[in-house]
Image (spheres, grey):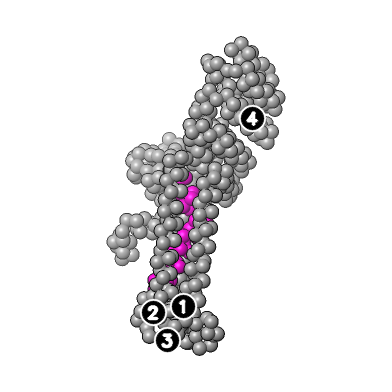
Amino acid sequence: MIDKLINSLPVHMRKYLQMSSRQRKYELQMTLWSLPLIYIGGTIIIVLITLFLDLQLNMSNYVHHWFSASGQATQTLVSTLIGGILTLSAFTLNSLLIVLTNFSAQFSPRMMFNFISDKTTQHLLGIFHASFIYVLFVFLFLTNNENEYYSAIPIMAVILAALTLITFIFFINHASSWMQVHNFTYSMKNTSKQIIEETLRFELEEYRGYQSGDLKSEYFASKKVASIPKSAYIQMIHFKDMIDEAQKDDVVIKLYKKIGDFSLKDNRLFAIWGPGAEKVSSDKYLKMIEFGHKKTEIQEMKMGISKLSEVAVKAIGASDPETALTTIHHIADLLLTINEDISFTPYLQDSEKQTRIIMEVEDFEYYLHKGFGKIRHHMENDYTMITELISVINMMAESMPEDKQDTLWEFASNTADHILDNFIYDIDRRYLLEQLHELALLTGHEKDFYLVEKKLMHH
């Protein structure tokens, strides 16, 4: 019965009921109507309270005459406020559209969702809609009532009108402030950090195993392979539930896809093997993986890095080096967080330290390339920006452990190698070599530096 009722709902409503609670929360944050809807619900309660105070308790009899108004004056006030608040709302929505258009054109279409999901944006829009709903409902009751004096209604109407005006000023300031590169890139970086620290770190780190242990390899020949039921992105995997069930069933699961990967229908998704594999249905584990038509940031680290990288690329193309450099700094900070909080091991183990899940994982080099690879490609012959990029890598080398030093040096020296076919001014060469030499000293690659220096000096 419930399934039939859900299926009878429109697609846009039905999809929220079919999601997990975590995915539903994420999707609702990406909409403009979720928080304003709560404000509107609260406004209905305020409408009922003020109508009760004026129509049932006759509040105007118990307050000073300064705070009372005749029925005609109250009706005129409310009807005027309807037009005024509606006008302010129209200006606000127009400003919102301008912000979203600029974000899409100048930076990335994915930036729109960051602005929409921002709590301040949603709260301010909620106040606008709530104020308009209040005066609209109250006006409806005023036209059908012959009370001579009102008090609660005009007081609340004036308060909401003043609040709406203040909110309008705040919204313009918020929109203009959010459009400043250093603000929204900082916000994006913090959002990605929050995903890493609150979800991936606490979900996965306690289960990470650095050694493979017993992989039940003697059962591997009789493994069961499950395929993805439809073409979709892998949006989310309930790792804890999967580990618990694998422990009960005494099986090992090998995931062939990562969070954020796209798969076509019938592509292999995971394999199951172990002593209990014959009695297990792969459908049970298939329900622990959520699919969708788009990527989400719920569990995916590289999406935040990709968005920041895209902003830097757009800035380089628009000859805006300061924006690009600011974004590069935030990417470096995000890479530092990834290195500190995430272990690059594919093994997830149960409470008895038995490996239950083998994941496809990326190493630090992958995330470094994901963050800076496209950026350095679009720098082309801009040696000043290349020098700045290597300077940022120097800072990363100072903060990262020894096992990442070789990766950082290889990336920086390879970045310098590509300019050998192009003309370079002497001063640009000198600054570039200074940064490379500093990095070589930090990473223990001084001998390799002299080879790069020799190539550049003879260029």
| Disc nearer the start of the sequence (4/3) | 3
- Horizontal and vertical percent for residue 448? 65, 18
Q: Is residue 350 left or right of residue 295?
A: right
Give the foreground label among 1 and 4.
1
- Count numbered badges in the picture: 4
Residue 38, disc: none
Which portion, as a residue range, is magenta?
Answer: 109-137
* Nearest to the observer: residue 16 or residue 264: 16
Q: Residue at x 48, y 46 (%)?
A: 297
Residue 142, disc: 2
- Residues at circles 1 and 2 in contact by the CB criterion of under 8 Å: yes
Tell me the SS state at disc 2. helix
Q: CA distance from mark 1 to mark 3?
A: 13 Å
Tell me the SS state at disc 4. helix
| Disc nearer the start of the sequence (2/3) | 2
Give the amino acid type for the residue marked by disc 3 in the picture.
Glu
Q: Is residue 426 left or right of residue 295?
A: right
Residue 391, disc: 4
Give the amino acid type for the residue marked by disc 4 in the picture.
Ser
Residue 148, disc: 3
Tell me if residue 112 is in the magenta stretch.
yes
Above or below residue 40? Residue 64 is: below
- Horizontal and vertical percent for residue 54? 46, 83
Q: Residues within 10 Å of mark 1 (few under 14, many from 20)?
A: many
The N terminus lies in which quarter of the figure? bottom left
Give the foreground label among 1 and 3.
3
Residue 153, disc: 1
Tell me the SS state at disc 3. loop
Give the amino acid type for the residue marked by disc 1 in the picture.
Ile
Q: Residue furthest bottom?
A: 61
